[in-house]
Amino acid sequence: MLILSAASSSSSSFMLSSASSSSARIPRPLSSFSTCVPVVVTTVSAAATSTLFPISCFGVKSRTVGIRKLRCALFCASKVRGMAEMIEDAMTVSASESHELPQSRDFLDARTGEDLLSAVQKAVEDEKLPLNVAEGMEDLYQNYRNAVLQSGVPKADEAILYNMALVFDRVFVDVKDPFEFSPYHKAIREPFDYYKFGQNYIRQLVDFRSSYVGNISVFGEMAEKLKQGDNVVLMSNHQSEADPAIIALLIESKLPDIAENIIYVAGDRVITDPLCKPFSMGRNLLCVYSKKHMNDEPELAEMKKRANTRSLKEMALLLRYLCCFCFVFLGVFWGGSKIIWIAPSGGRDRPDPVTNEWYPAPFDASATDNMRRLVQHAGVPGHIYPLAILCHDIMPPPAQVEKNIGEKRVVSFHGAGISVAPKIDFHEVAGALEDPEAKMVYTEALYDSVSQQYNVLNSAIHGKQGLKASIPSVSLSQPWQ
């Protein structure tokens, strides 16, 4: 679901707890379903993978802080407008969060899968749901049901019904009142926790017995850098719309702060496709238009470039150290302590058309160089790490890049993996070279590391070597064990 940021304005990129009566009639897999408990991976039996069933995503109605009237005169070297917005964001909860949560009882009150599908048909008949969206919902239900049943987890039927009822409800509500993403979107956690909603949905598709994390100690190093106020950038391949959830699921037991706070550079398709939007709403996103789709509609190309420029400015603000003075108080506002995920390939990996083998798609040197320069000029230390992800079996992309929004989604139950290597410093790798050779050499170093890590994950998962697939530079583990 995610993509890449990038070359100047035209570049591109890639994406509880309280219970509520609003979901009371949906069967709940666990007796403690409606309690406020942490999400922890457990194992019930050798046949079970992860037995984590969804916890209610409906939270308590949020309260505004009531300081929205504060208006400061800001004096800053640059980005006065951006700083003003940052202050407002820091001191008030969005007014939209104080509204009652819109819901569709037809979906949330469903007692069976047939009830869900009947509610979809009724919404079409009542002209409340477009036919193409309804067909996508029905296909997704059947695919998800088959995949989760394949997992063998206890009470799979209840998990399927609960998760799909929430998906249908959120899609239906957004069709009625479409959510608009800002260039920098913060994950929506109240009054509905879209982050946990996405985690719970994808969790049922992950075979944790055959899933692995490479170099968990390097993830720990990243966490320490973030605590010190440094920025971290993950240069990664991109396999599916489920990438953000997979990354979070595989590290949340050890590093929940990283799992929840990664900012993903996301292509426009994941914030416009009706079936994808609810999941994107639960992620921190920098929204851009994908380079691959920049000219799908030539008349919109300039608008897309301007939007990408705004998103790059937002990214620069997130990474940057800024001081500000105000009539009411004197303060120092810090950027930094941000972790950003980018896929410099500009899109999802695809299998080789001849061998059908999967490999990370080549990185765009302009994308990696632009990101490096943003990090370098942020005013706080920044570190760039190569990250590999293997999860295409769970939610593979279409065989070919499609222009139209609304791709068919096929899901399955499978193992997945992520791995991160030590940071790669530009000056150590290419500091003695001149452009364009320098940025090419640096991009190759990042890509080669990602490819090596990917091959180790592939051997562990598809080659069924498990932890024995580790090599000196990639140590595999299962942190949830």
Image (cartoon, grey):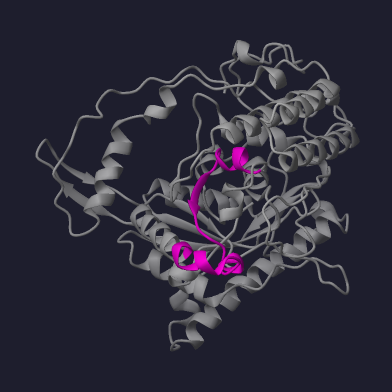
Q: Position of residue 55 (x, y in %)?
A: 66, 22
- Check if residue 140 falls in the magenta segment: no
At a point 74% along the width and 31% down the height, the residue shown is: 124
At a point 80% along the width and 35% down the height, the residue shown is: 141
Q: Position of residue 45 (x, y in %)?
A: 87, 28
Q: Is residue 352 left or right of residue 316?
A: right
Q: Position of residue 68 (x, y in %)?
A: 25, 29
Q: How many marks?
A: 0
- Check if residue 297 falls in the magenta segment: yes
Q: Nearer the viewer, residue 332 or 254?
A: 332
Note whether 357 is above or below 71 in the view shown: below
Q: Quadrant of residue 311?
A: bottom left
At a point 57% along the width and 23% down the height, the residue shown is: 16
Q: Position of residue 358 (x, y in %)?
A: 79, 65
Note whether 352 is above or below 65 in the view shown: below
Where, quadrant-wise, is the C terminus in this rendering? top right
Give the residues in magenta. 276-304
At a point 18% along the width and 59% down the height, the residue shown is: 77
- Residue 5 makes an appearance in the image: yes
Q: Is residue 400 left or right of residue 67?
A: right
